[in-house]
Amino acid sequence: MNQKKRQPSPSQNPLAIASKWVPWADKLLPLLGVVILLSFWEIAATSNWVNPVLLPTPVATIAELVIVTFRPENGLFLDFFTTLWRTLLSFAIGAILGVPLGIILGSNERVYRSFEFLIDFFRSTPASALIPMFLLFLGTSDWNKVVIPAFAGFLVIIFNSAYGVMNARQSRILAARVMGASHWDIFKDVLFWESLPQIFIGLRTGISISLVIVIVAEMFIGTDLGLGKRIFETQQILNVKDMYASILTTGVLGYCLNMIFRFVEKQIVHWSGR
């Protein structure tokens, strides 16, 4: 009699095991780059490729980060929240002005063409190059650390908002017109929603640029608190562990802000591309 071949149970099937493992592996993929970076950092710090005085190990840097974060005097905690506050305030100013103005410019091609040169000119000029100009008008006040990043974020946001409106799907606009929709109905029901994906690209880029310019302004304009000021001062006195800890904190802050906006974007424009 021919005996039927025993089929492996689902728990013993390699394909079934692999299919269960793949989703977990996909979730762990973002950690791969971190592991590679830390490994390279550790090798570079312990193999004397770089002077150990100038490059502490990742463990030493993270230990220093924990120590200085909650230090009673000159702690990283206050510098972190000062930079975060300036970044959010400058971004809010840029977004509140940039989004509606961008939508208005994008809704009328002639109006946009009238201001296209100015937008592209200032958008192409590094905001850090404008710091001396702002210093002439605002001095070294704390407002400089907000106004300059707000201006840089505003340019990116207004450009992306206008671009999103101008590149809305013409088929949906035509369909709305055929159905007798008014200009206002087309704007609020079609143009606005069609432009949201591009607007969020501008917002995500804007908050990243705001953080960068806040750090630069804190470094070179001068301030009592802030991550930029801390990075610059610790570099001057060769306190490299504190310097790298501050740089690491800045990178984590930027990453977290970006992830928050990606989450919000997915919740609001989950229909994008459909």
Image (cartoon, helix red, strand yellow):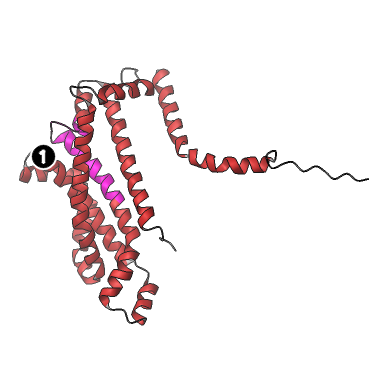
Instruction: Name the residue: 6% across, 44% down.
Output: 138
Which residue is situated farthest in the right direction here?
1
Instruction: Name the residue: 47% across, 35% down.
Output: 32
Q: Position of residue 73 (x, y in %)?
A: 18, 22
Looking at the rendered image, the quarter that the C terminus falls into is bottom left
The mark tally for this picture is 1
Q: Is residue 223 magenta?
A: yes
Q: Is residue 221 magenta?
A: yes
Q: Could you tell me if residue 130 is visible in this image?
A: no
Query: Eyeballing the image, is 117 above or below 222?
Result: below
Q: Residues within 10 Å of mark 1 (few under 14, many from 20)?
A: some
Q: Position of residue 177 (x, y in %)?
A: 34, 79
Which element is circle 1 on?
A: loop
Query: Eyeballing the image, is 164 above or below 127?
Result: below
Q: Quadrant of residue 159?
A: bottom left
Q: Could you tell me if residue 270 is visible in this image?
A: yes
56, 203: nearer the viewer = 203
Instruction: Name the residue: 23% across, 29% down.
Output: 77
221, 223: nearer the viewer = 223
Task: Specify start and end residues of the magenta stretch as a single range.
Answer: 204-229
Instruction: Name the residue: 65% across, 43% down.
Output: 16
Q: Quadrant of residue 186?
A: bottom left
Query: Eyeballing the image, is 94 above or below 165?
Result: above
Looking at the rendered image, the quarter that the N terminus falls into is top right
Q: Is residue 179 left or right of residue 238?
A: right
Circle 1 is placed at which residue position? 142
Q: Position of residue 52 (x, y in %)?
A: 34, 17
Q: Quadrant of residue 235?
A: top left
Overall secondary structure of the magenta stretch? helix
Amino acid type, label 1: Asp
